[in-house]
Amino acid sequence: MTRTATVTRTTSESDVTVTLNLDGAGTSTVSTGVPFFDHMLTALSKHSCIDMDINASGDTHIDVHHTVEDTSIVIGQALKEALGTKAGIRRYGHAYVPLDESLARAVVDISGRPYFVHSGEPEGQQYHLIGGHFTGSMVGHALESLSVSAGLTTHVTLLAGRDPHHIAEAQFKAFARALRTAVEPDPRTDAIPSTKGAL
């Protein structure tokens, strides 16, 4: 079974195309016009072992918000499409990831019920400019936009952290590792992992 998808979304604010292969090795080509976001998406691909080809352009001369949000939405849409019926997946995944002084935890349920909980960041993180123009608030917004579009229940918690770059990166990597487990085929069953028979 091939678990791949390509999704394109064009608005007056951005033009985004994403191709995913859930059974890849974590190779990626990422170009969004937002350098720090490219860094985070490259890490997302690498640590989830999901191959990603992401090409986005947008009104970054105004703000990075639209491009980050729209790219995350399309990644989520492609993830949902690639998962298909979700038969035979593990469904749940969790991970703890340290990055020097920072420690993040992510828990993912491929539930079909979009829900996002984000906590633990220190006050001021949301205003910090990482890489000169990527505000700290974009971390939670990107992960929420992806999760809602994919139909995931996601909890991301920062347990420790001081450096804004480390705080952001630890959260993306924790989410990636949790997602890797959740989308993996379950070697014990090819059934849809729900007592309802549908996700």
Image (tube, rainbow, N blue to C red):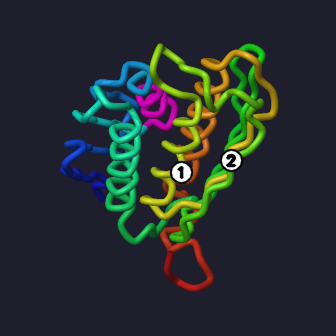
Taking the spot 54% from the left edge, 60% from the top edge, the residue there is 152
Q: Are marks 1 and 2 in contact (CB under 8 Å)?
A: yes
Residue type, mark 1 in image: Glu
Instruction: Examine the residues drawn in magenta and state their main secondary structure.
Output: helix
Q: Earlier in the sequence, mark 1 or mark 2?
A: 2
* Image quadrant where residue 84 sits: bottom left
Return the residue found at the far front.
62
Taking the spot 53% from the left edge, 18% from the top edge, the residue there is 130
Residue 2, disc: none
Is 133 placed above or below 183 here? Answer: above
Residue 176 relative to residue 69: left or right: right
- For label 2, the SS is strand
Q: Nearer the viewer, residue 177 or 101?
A: 101
Q: Nearer the viewer, residue 132 or 170?
A: 132
* Image quadrant where residue 162 sits: top right
Whole-percent x and y of residue 103?
Answer: 75, 27
Residue 47 relative to residue 102: left or right: left
Return the residue found at the far bottom.
196
Instruction: Estimate how packed mark 2 is, as few (under 14), some (14 to 19) or many (20 or more) residues with alpha carbons within 10 Å.
Output: some
**Residue 20 shows in this picture:** yes
**Residue 56 shows in this picture:** no
Taking the spot 72% from the left edge, 33% from the top edge, the residue there is 104
- For label 1, the SS is helix
Residue type, mark 2 in image: His
Whole-percent x and y of residue 46?
Answer: 45, 28
Return the residue found at the far right.
160
Q: Which residue is mark 2?
A: 118
Instruction: Estimate how packed mark 1 is, as few (under 14), some (14 to 19) or many (20 or more) residues with alpha carbons within 10 Å.
Output: many
Is 195 placed above or below 174 here? Answer: below
Q: Nearer the viewer, residue 184 or 157?
A: 157
Q: What span is in magenta?
A: 40-49
Residue 144, disc: 1
